């Protein structure tokens, strides 16, 4: 455990890959590996997860982390890991109850029983991205001008004992530019990779890269390049890492905007650019200033997002549906204040409580108009929240300061939002 006992012995350091249950959002299991990891991708059949891995050296210092010419893309056999946990082949760390399996190289030398396997990738790779057809994972070199294409079927063959060398899962490793980081796809066989040092996006064809790597040096795998502004990192085409890749538009998050926008101080807004990828050549469409620094995003089809502009008041058990039901109830020193808001007024003009009370305010917004959000703030009590149309929210606090406290609507729901208030009277 990280409790201070091994601070000076870096050989005792370790890295954990974490699986989170999508329904409960709790940690399901962890797997200890060699080196460090960055991003993750999963196969469409659910068997494999993978993370790009840097610092296989296990270095604690900058220069040590870049000493090896090759790092890895580490693959996790999810089914085997979960079976190992069922069989009790795990440990726990410290007071955590999360099962931890051993995914280090030394513990997984037999591919047919291995929980993990390590595909060598140069150098300090950054990002691993799944192709829309489900065939390949692509890792970029970061400190190498190359992108590595890994055939998932061959990784599975290796884990099943049908392939004698994990290096044979590498079907392409081609030069695409300086500082390659993240990759997205158009669904037409092309990959788009950010080049941090070149300040470019490179469009390259995966099948052509595979043919070139196999020995056909007449193949041109680079299709196009476009300058971006500047030092791009994350990238996403519409539905780019799904089977529904659209191949219409691409967004890129640039880490530096430099001269693209008027400076507003030492911390610049950075630049997110939108690019048209419908044709053979990429076309720059627009710059957008964004908070520093843009880090990952996706473009999805509009119909995938199911929005609701007005809540259903019946979804909230604590909702007050009629202003006449507003009021204050007391149970010992626990006080409940029920309020409704309808712009520009709260249902109670004031409410009285006593110093030392534990107060719960339950506020229901009874307006049914889309976008008519209300606010509720109590100065000196560090309380400020919003309630959307037909929504109910509550806050609990201790009334430890006597006096008169105006409760304001802090969201401009009406021209009279400053007049929209109630008084909280805290008696000594």
Image (cartoon, grey):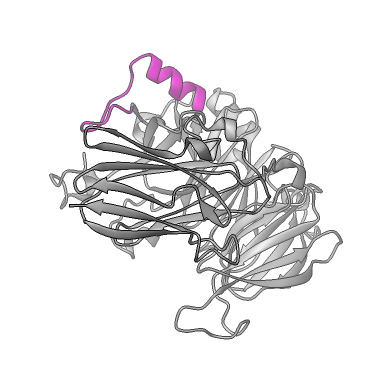
Depth check: 280 or 360 in front? 360
Q: Residue 200's spot in the image, x, y percent? A: 66, 70
The part of the chain drawn in magenta is 78-98
Q: Farthest residue in the top direction?
A: 87
Q: Quadrant of the N terminus?
A: top left
Please tell me which residue lies in front, 308 or 53: 308
Q: Against 354, is 291 above or below?
A: below
Return the x and y of residue 177 as percentages of the image width and height. Answer: 63, 67
Q: Quadrant of residue 154?
A: top right
Q: Is residue 330 above or below residue 366?
A: above
In front here: 172 or 184?
184
Q: Is residue 317 visible?
A: yes
Residue 67 at least partly seen:
no
User: Could you tell me residue 264's position as x and y percent?
Assistant: 51, 84
Using residue 335 as the reference point, say whether residue 198 is left or right of it: right
Residue at the location (65% across, 54% down)? 371
Q: Is residue 96 magenta?
A: yes
Q: How far across and how far down the image is residue 224, in percent?
A: 78, 66
Residue 59 within the segment the image draws in magenta: no
């Amino acid at each position: 455990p990280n409790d201070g006992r091994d601070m000076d012995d870096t050989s005792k350091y370790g890295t954990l890959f974490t699986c989170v249950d999508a329904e409960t959002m709790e940690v399901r299991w962890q797997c200890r590996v060699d080196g460090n990891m960055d991003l993750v991708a999963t196969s469409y059949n659910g068997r494999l997860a993978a993370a790009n891995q840097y610092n296989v050296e296990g270095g604690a210092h900058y220069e040590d982390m870049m000493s090896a010419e090759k790092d890895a893309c580490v693959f996790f056999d999810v089914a085997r890991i979960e079976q190992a946990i069922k069989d009790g082949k795990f440990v726990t760390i410290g007071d955590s109850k999360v099962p931890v399996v051993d995914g280090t190289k030394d513990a997984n030398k037999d591919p047919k029983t291995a929980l993990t396997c390590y595909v060598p990738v140069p150098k300090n790779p950054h990002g691993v991205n799944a192709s829309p057809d489900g065939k390949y994972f692509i890792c970029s070199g970061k400190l190498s001008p190359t992108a590595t294409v890994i055939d998932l079927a061959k990784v599975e063959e290796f884990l099943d004992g049908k392939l004698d060398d994990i290096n044979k899962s590498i079907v392409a490793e081609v030069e695409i530019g300086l500082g390659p980081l993240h990759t997205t796809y158009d669904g037409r066989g092309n990959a788009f990779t950010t080049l941090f040092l070149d300040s470019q996006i490179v469009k390259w064809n995966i099948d052509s890269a595979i043919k070139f790597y196999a020995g056909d040096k007449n193949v041109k795998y680079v299709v196009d390049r476009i300058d971006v502004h500047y030092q791009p990192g994350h990238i996403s085409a519409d539905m780019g890492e799904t089977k529904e890749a659209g191949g219409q538009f691409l967004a890129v998050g640039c880490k530096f905007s430099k001269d693209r926008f008027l400076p507003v101080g030492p911390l610049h807004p950075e630049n997110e650019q939108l690019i048209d990828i419908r044709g053979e050549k990429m076309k720059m469409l627009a710059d957008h200033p964004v908070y520093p620094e843009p880090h990952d995003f996706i473009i999805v089809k509009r119909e995938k997002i199911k929005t609701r502009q007005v809540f259903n008041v019946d979804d909230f058990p604590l909702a007050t549906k009629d202003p006449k039901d507003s009021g204050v109830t007391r149970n010992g020193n626990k006080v409940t204040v029920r309020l409704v808001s309808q712009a520009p007024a709260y249902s109670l003009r004031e409410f009285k409580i006593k110093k030392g009370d534990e107060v719960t305010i339950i506020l229901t917004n009874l307006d049914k108009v889309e976008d008519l959000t209300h606010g509720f703030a109590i100065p000196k009590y560090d309380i400020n929240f919003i309630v959307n149309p037909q929504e109910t929210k509550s806050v609990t606090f201790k009334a430890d300061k006597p006096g008169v406290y105006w409760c304001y609507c802090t969201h401009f729901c009406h021209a009279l939002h400053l007049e929209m208030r109630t008084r909280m009277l805290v008696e000594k």
